[in-house]
Image (spheres, coloured by chain):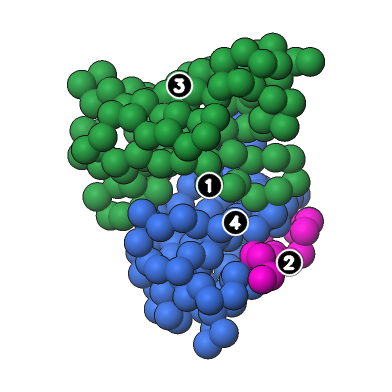
Chain colours: A blue, B green
Amino acid sequence: ETGVTQSPTHLIKTRGQQVTLRCSSQSGHNTVSWYQQALGQGPQFIFQYYREEENGRGNFPPRFSGLQFPNYSSELNVNALELDDSALYLCASSSSASAYNEQFFGPGTRLTVL
Amino acid sequence: DQQVKQNSPSLSVQEGRISILNCDYTNSMFDYFLWYKKYPAEGPTFLISISSIKDKNEDGRFTVFLNKSAKHLSLHIVPSQPGDSAVYFCAAVDSNYQLIWGAGTKLIIKP
């Protein structure tokens, strides 16, 4: 059974640029959630995708957008990057959209915005 | 405003002793709590959870206690082992069925 994978591992961008982060969910999982973890803080919920539809969103601006594909892998897109977007971006997959279900996390993508 | 607070950024415990990690929350509507463990360069992994209808849940060396009146929960690890050295996050499920996370406590187990 393949776990959750994320790419790339690290990324450096400049302010104003756009970035796409990718996540492959664990086999059999139909739900992917994305989190932003700033240094010294806990993960903050960005949004969740369930069967290719957005299913809940945290307090993030519209320049954070996402997609989920028929194989349940997912992308996180961030436009007009700002310095404060520098963080570890985590994706988690689960077998249902319920937050009561265990979520399985990937190792994250470290984004640095200069 | 932080709805889930872990006030100790780090904790050092002797191997074999008990580790107690604390978590406070402000929203009395939270009805389910989880603990995750995170090693460097890895994603968080689920450890143990507790529903608000219980005050204790045990799984091997790990026990979570919930005190609803104090809006406080704690994770006990007995006995502590070197492999327990990690960052521990407390999280709660909010009314939108989203996870609200604390900032984490780094646990260091000394040999």
Q: Chain of mark 1?
A: B
Q: Nearer the viewer, mark 2 or mark 3?
A: 3
Q: Amino acid at mark 3?
A: Asn
Cα–Cα span, label 4 and label 3: 23 Å
**Magenta residue span:** A1-18
Amino acid type, residue under disc 2 in the picture = Ser
Q: Nearer the viewer, residue B12 or A55?
A: B12
Identity of the residue drawn at 53% across and 65% down:
A93
Examine the image and state in which quarter residue A18 appears.
bottom right
Label number found at residue B22: 3
Q: Main secondary structure of the magenta part?
A: loop
Do labels 4 and 1 touch, CB within 8 Å?
A: no
Looking at the rendered structure, whether the residues under marks 2 and 3 are on a common chain is answered as no
| Dot 2: chain letter | A
Mark 1 vs mark 3: which is more N-terminal? 3
| Quarter holding residue A17 | bottom right
Residue at mark 1 to residue at mark 3: CA–CA distance: 17 Å
Residue toward you, A50 or B32: B32
- Tell which tag, 1 or 3, sits nearer the viewer: 1
The residue at which mark 4 appears reads as A105
Tell me the residue that label 2 is attached to.
A7
